[in-house]
Structure formats: structure tokens, C-alpha cells
Image (cartoon, rainbow, N blue to C red):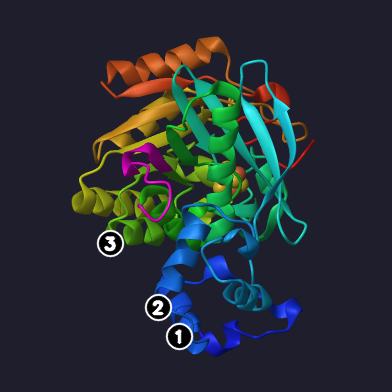
Amino acid sequence: MLLISLLFRKRKELKTDIRSLDLVDIKKFCQENNMKPYVSNQVYSWLWNNFSSSFSQMSNLSKSNREIFNENFSINKITEDFEERSDDGTIKMRFKLYDGNFVEGVLIPQNTRMTACISSQVGCSLSCKFCATGTMGRTRNLSTGEIYDQVVAIANKCKEVYNLPLTNIVYMGMGEPLLNYRNVIKSIHFITSSEGLEMSYKRVTLSTSGIAKMIKRLADDNVKVNLALSLHAASEELRNSIMPIGGSNSLDDIRDALKYYFSKTKRKVTYEYVLLNEVNDSIKDAENLYKFTKHIPSKVNLIEYNTVDGLGFDRSSDKNTDLFMNYLDAKRVNVGLRRSRGKDINAACGQLANKK
Ligand code: SF4
């Protein structure tokens, strides 16, 4: 339980973002300030159902109650700072956070499927060698509200530009979602419950680079979203050379965690595999991938790499890509190739780095 007394300090510079509080905490605050019990529910609904950015918008609260909330809390909304549109319709949005940091989110239109790719951290600590975000380091985790705001902002953009609702959400932007577990899980709650956007769990995909113990926790907590594992190499040595996280989470650890995950959830896992020219795209690499995928029901998304200046990796040739896919096909692996989207605006997979 949060230390309620600490949260309610009145000095302006110490105002707490009210969206970091649970409903129980807001109820307690209301009680301590002699407000009617239903006020907490009204405030909660303004915050999560109506996306309010100030207490003055909460028109069914009395003026004095609005003032009390305003004196004690802030609402740290994100604001759209910059936007870029790709020739293929992809829209990259850069968001400014209350403390001056930035993160990016992307709207990816594919026929009637409208996907929001959102960030969970400012930067990322995992330093995957092929990823632009990995060069930034991690500044901080995003709050639940900041993650949720990206979805709302991208949904609004989708409505405005394409006149269509958002259909899918992927936690594949900046950061490792499982290293910001609490806030990510809470944001999924608001995206999927009647307290927020009421989208189906089946439309939400969480992508991890492979934090084995947190994959087990996802299973234990019965978080019903789709799980994608950014595998990118299925031999220990190669994976460690391009994804330093492999040093503390071996392929054996990850495989055990995924088996545990499947035994508890009965949900298929998706393996993401970015094809890097002459790094991980040989037939031997395909064979390793096939062996890794055999243990639980799964599918494989091969991803076209988007070159990032200075990182020294290139996209696989068409020939190698075909050979790789054909090998997996012949082994009856459920495999597809994800073409790059938004690469002309640095909005594609692995290219998010807050660059204009
Ligand atoms: S690929 Fe994902 S986990 Fe790896 S550095 Fe980039 S954002 Fe972080």
C-alpha cells in the first residue's frame, strides 16, 4: 500500500500524478477531505474513461472539490510534439512528457487493421546491437498514464486520418515492457477493461526480448494478452553477440519460461526474428530457429531489417530471405514475413530514437 500521507503533500512541486493512484487511494483521499464517497468514482471515470487533462474539466464535481484535487495533485498527460507520415500511410508521433523527455508511438495502417505500436520506457537499457533505441540507454520507465495516453492519442489520430477505430496494440516501441512490469500491466488493464477503452485482450501483444522470470510471472498473473518473443538468434553465442540480455537470460532459461507460460496459459507464442544480412540468416540459423520453436505451439514472424546508420547491419538479401523462409516452411513451421513499414520516416521496427 502506498504511503498515503506522503502522496497528499500540498506543496506544488511535490504534487503527485493522480493517475499513479488506485481507486482505493483516491477513495481514502476523498474520505480524509470530507467528500461524498461517490466523488472518487467520478474522478476515476474522468481520468480513465474521459481522458481528462485537468480537474477543471470534471464538470460534475463541485468547484471546491475540484480545487482540493487541483491543490494536491497533477495530471501528467503526454502531448503530441511532432508527427511524420510515411508514403505507406504509417504515422510516427513523438510525444513530450511532463518532465521534458520524449517517446515515440506509431500508427500502422494495413487495410482495416489499424495497429498502434507504443513505448513502455524512455529509451532502453538492453542495448540490442541492431536497434536505434538501444543506443539511447534508459532514462526512466513510463507511468501507466503515459503508456495509456499514447494509445488514446494514436486512436484519435487513426479516427482523424483514416476514420477507423484502432484495432490492435503492440508493446513494441521504445523499451522492454517486462522491465516496467507494474505500469505496463496496469496500462493493459485500462486498455482492456470497462474502466478504460474496453478493447479485447486478444488485440493486445506484448513483446519481450526474453526476461525469463518475468515471462513466468506473466503466466502466474494470467495476463491474457498475446506474447511475442524477440528471439533474433537461436544459438547462444550468436544471440549474446547481438542481444546482451542473453548473458543473463540464456536460451535454455527462455525456453523453460515459455514452456511454463504455455502450460499455464495454453496460448501460442510468436517468435519475432529480424533477418540481418550474413549474421543470422543462414540455413544453419534457420535450423536452430526450427529446433527452438519445436517445444511449444508457436508461429514465427520474420522481419525485414531497417538499416540504422552507424550500427553496421544490413537487411538480408531476397535470396537468403527466401531460402530461410522455405526451410521453415518445409519443416511445417507457421511462418510469415513482415515487410518493413514506415522506414522512410524512421518509424519501423528498431528505428525509434526520438529523431526528427
Ligand atoms: S530491440 Fe527492444 S529490447 Fe532491444 S534495445 Fe531495442 S527497444 Fe530495447
Q: Residue at x 34, y 46 (%)?
A: 225
Left or right side of 17 for 284: left
Numbered disc in front, either 2 or 3: 2
The residue that label 2 is drawn on is 37
Q: CA distance from mark 1 to mark 2?
A: 7 Å
Left or right side of 220 for 170: right
Local crowd at mark 1 within 10 Å, few (<14), some, or many (≥20)? some
- Is any atom of residue 345 visible in this view? yes
Q: Residue at x 27, y 57 (%)?
A: 222
Q: Nearer the viewer, residue 220 or 142?
A: 142
The kind of residue on which mark 1 rests is Gln
The kind of residue on which mark 2 rests is Pro
Local crowd at mark 3 within 10 Å, few (<14), some, or many (≥20)? few
In this view, 157 is above or below 125: above
Q: Is mark 2 within 8 Å of ligand 1?
A: no
- Is any atom of residue 340 visible in this view? no
Q: Secondary structure at mark 1?
A: helix
Asked if the residue at tag 2 contacts the one at tag 1, i.e. Cβ–Cβ closer than 8 Å, the answer is yes
Residue 238 placement (x, y as % from top left): 52, 40
Q: Residue at x 74, y 42 (%)?
A: 354
Q: Which residues are magenta?
A: 194-205
Left or right side of 198 for 48: right
Residue 285 placement (x, y as % from top left): 44, 29
Q: Nearer the viewer, residue 236 or 13?
A: 13
The kind of residue on which mark 3 rests is Asp
Q: Secondary structure at mark 2?
A: loop
The C terminus - image quarter: top right
For residue 220, which numbered disc appears in the image?
3
The residue that label 1 is drawn on is 31
Marked residue nearer the N-terminal end (2 or 3): 2
Q: Secondary structure at mark 3?
A: helix
Q: CA distance from mark 3 to mark 1?
A: 34 Å
